[in-house]
Image (cartoon, rainbow, N blue to C red):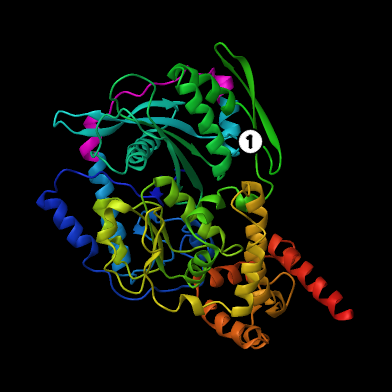
Amino acid sequence: MTTPRGTWIFSSMRSKTRPSQDEGENNFRRRLFSSFRGERQRSKGAEEDGTTEIEKRRALSDGGLETSKGVFLAGEDQDPEMGAMKRFSSMFSSFRGKINKDRASKEPDLLVSTELSPLEEKSKEQRYASGQFFFDYLVVVTPKLTKEGTYEPQIIYQFPKKDGMVRFQKEEEEKTLKALKLFCFPEGVNWAPLTEYCSETFSFVLTDVDGSRKNGYCRRLLPYGKGARPPEAYCIISNVACFGLFSNILDEVEKRRKISMAMIYPFMQSLRESAFPAPGHTVSIKSFIPERGTETISLTRPTDSWLEHVDFRTLFSCLSDEEVLLVFAATVLERRIIFIAEELGTLSQVIHAVAVLLYPFIWQHTLISIIPEILIDVVMAPTPYLLGVQKRLADQVTDQTEVLIVDLSENRTETFIKCVGDEDTILPNKLKEEIRQALRAKNDKSSLEELNQVVPEAFLPFFIKTVGHFAKHIVRNDKDKQGEFQQRNFYKAIESKSSRHFVKKFLQTQMFDLFIQEVEQRPASQDGTGFFERKISEYQKKMREAKKH
């Protein structure tokens, strides 16, 4: 049986900015966005290959997905009548192929680590397949001077180098590695040697055709030395979504890079040999550093797994509580939202934090942390999205309508450059005030752990009070059969007029549609066992006790 080829589409698309575009590229851009039209379509039921609609949509929550029939974007159905969005995706796939072909002859040889024995390799491959590795691989990317006199990102180091792959696996890995260059340096050739550069950290997500995800964590820094020199990007690819933990790992990588590139390998080797800790647990890594001896590094995984990939500090340092509420209101109704900032880390951290505010619901549409200049016209897409745009490209997106444009820059004159106008009226006033009150428990000095407790406790009750009664309206004729959601009865059970007004709109979102489909299809034995359901039970118990008194 032949294993299907895996192809990655990146939620943080980055492309190289060239000095000029030839006519072919201009034609590509015109064809790419000339046919955006129509409304998004929905489809309930199984796909031809047996994959359920739920699995397809779950796989798409962070970007597009490439299949043997082409590419389709998050929230769009794989359907012959899908129209413009499918054509857009197919052309983007062709564009990626063109980049790979043009760059194939320019790839440098990759530096590799020492090889493992067959027995060790077999053992490690088993652990890797079970998802126990900290990371898949580490690559180092730096701009290299080309014959044309420009600086082009090139991979100068990879650890580990995987052996024993069949031809198509090697081809897919090469495509992924080449694309990573664009992620690490979205500015493309717009680089020159520097004498000063503040290191920055950002992340992105890769989604495979089978729904599995890989996360990219990047640290860009200026290597130690004298005179002008290009920066380096250290990018870790992992199956695990845990931004805070990998940010700590990149701190250790940067510390060792200041001594020597050779000091990075033994640390990453020790990390790769360690089992990834369970939520709330800590793993200790021992690593030797000259003149310091053996150090023990402790890495702790957050208790709540759904908060692993988020750092709320950036969101609340860029926006006030009231501004966050307006962004949340637009996001919960799945609108088009563009964030503008100068730093890559700010864009990626804010966008991921906003998506987590939706918990237990999942953003089902396009999510691109940073849009490269060559694909900036993606803002013209009529479907919902969360997009990050660098400040230098802001003038190219501000002419859009029916969109919320949020400026995160420190020197901004206004936060909301564009808005629909009704963002302040979307959420019920009483519930909005409760979120405000809960957020007052934090302050400017709140730690990451404190924010990870305060923020969910502020936003999760909003969904508990508006749609937390959903389980009472799932009808099952038999415990072993699929349930059926009684939407009309669910809606009529809401007593508050303002809450009914909100829920009427929220019922039309794909995030709610997917959530209910999952509840309908899961076994009755699992009802009430999830984190959200437990919080609902706690709230309902509290309300019953309050009535008694």
Q: Is residue 490 above or below residue 214?
A: below
Does residue 527 show up? no
Q: Nearer the viewer, residue 307 or 477?
A: 307
The residue segment tinted magenta is 101-121
Task: Report x, y in % for residue 451.
Answer: 63, 53
Amino acid type of the residue that numbered disc 1 sits on in the rendered structure: Phe
Dividing the picture into quadrants, the one containing residue 403 is bottom left
Q: For numbered disc 1, what is the local secondary structure?
A: loop
Q: Nearer the viewer, residue 299 or 170?
A: 299
The residue wearing badge 1 is 276
Q: Nearer the viewer, residue 424 or 234?
A: 424
Task: Report x, y in % for residue 539.
Answer: 76, 70
Q: Is residue 42 above or below residue 489?
A: above
Q: Quadrant of the C terminus?
A: bottom right
Please give left or right for residue 485 compared with residue 52 in the image: right
Decide whether residue 111 is among the magenta residues: yes
Residue at (23, 38) in percent of width and height: 189
Residue at (46, 17) in percent of width and height: 259
Crowding at dot 1, Cα within 10 Å, few <14 / some 14-19 / many 20+, comes out as many
Please give left or right for residue 482 compared with residue 331 in the image: right
Dividing the picture into quadrants, the one containing residue 111 is top left
Does residue 351 show up? yes
- Which residue is situated farthest in the right direction here? 549
Residue at (44, 45) in percent of width and height: 345
Residue at (39, 54) in percent of width and height: 409
Q: Nearer the viewer, residue 229 or 131?
A: 229
